[in-house]
């Protein structure tokens, strides 16, 4: 993938959340098993657990399969859990924001990046109604750009 990318797309997995590392690792293994049957790898660039850890999917340099039409120009970050009615915990939110800062500082994400929710690009409820409301208040969010 050509970096730095212009877009950061926020997702949720719409599966149970994980707050301890062992459970988050189990979920990552499950994603590896299910995603590799249809795609060549985990579809997201990164996943974040409510344990506060960032888990690498395709990473910074490989094109993901997380957002049709945007995969080759975005980093897809998914928080593990279902956030229709609640937000990720503080540890997960901090990890997402720190990951974006890291991507900017290392030159993988443009300094003038645009943050979007998955629903801004594809017809979906992702990243969940509650979480989506929160990210609309984050710096660099732009639903239309």
Image (cartoon, rainbow, N blue to C red):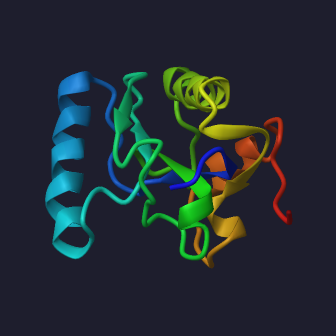
User: Residue 103 occupies which quadrant of the picture?
Assistant: top right
User: Residue 46 occupies which quadrant of the picture?
Assistant: top left
- Quarter of the image for the C terminus: give it: bottom right
Q: Residue at x 36, y 41 (%)?
A: 17
Q: Position of residue 65 (x, y in %)?
A: 43, 66
Q: Residue at x 26, y 59 (%)?
A: 41
In the image, 73 versus 92, the foreground residue is 73
In screen coordinates, is 7 left or right of 42? right
User: Residue 52 occupies which quadrant of the picture?
Assistant: top left
Q: Residue at x 81, y 61 (%)?
A: 143
Q: Position of residue 2 (x, y in %)?
A: 57, 54
Q: Position of residue 8 (x, y in %)?
A: 65, 49
Q: Is residue 103 above or below residue 142?
A: above
Picture mark count: 0
Q: Is residue 83 above or below residue 119?
A: above
Q: Which residue, as the protein is rendered here, is positioned at the far front?
A: 2
Q: Position of residue 127 (x, y in %)?
A: 57, 56
In screen coordinates, is 44 left or right of 126? left
């Amino acid at each position: 993938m050509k970096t730095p990318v212009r877009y950061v797309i926020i997702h949720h997995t719409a599966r149970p959340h994980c707050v301890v590392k062992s459970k988050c690792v189990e979920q990552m293994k499950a994603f590896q098993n299910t995603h590799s049957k249809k795609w060549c790898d985990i579809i997201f660039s990164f996943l974040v657990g409510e344990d506060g850890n960032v888990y690498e999917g395709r990473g910074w340099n490989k094109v993901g399969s997380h957002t049709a039409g945007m995969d080759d120009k975005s980093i897809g970050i998914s928080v593990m859990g279902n956030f229709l009615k609640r937000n990720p915990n503080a540890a997960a939110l901090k990890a997402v924001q720190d990951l974006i800062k890291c991507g900017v500082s290392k030159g993988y994400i443009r300094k003038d990046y645009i943050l979007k929710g998955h629903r801004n690009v594809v017809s979906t409820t992702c990243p969940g109604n509650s979480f989506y409301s929160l990210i609309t208040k984050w710096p660099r969010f732009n639903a239309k750009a």
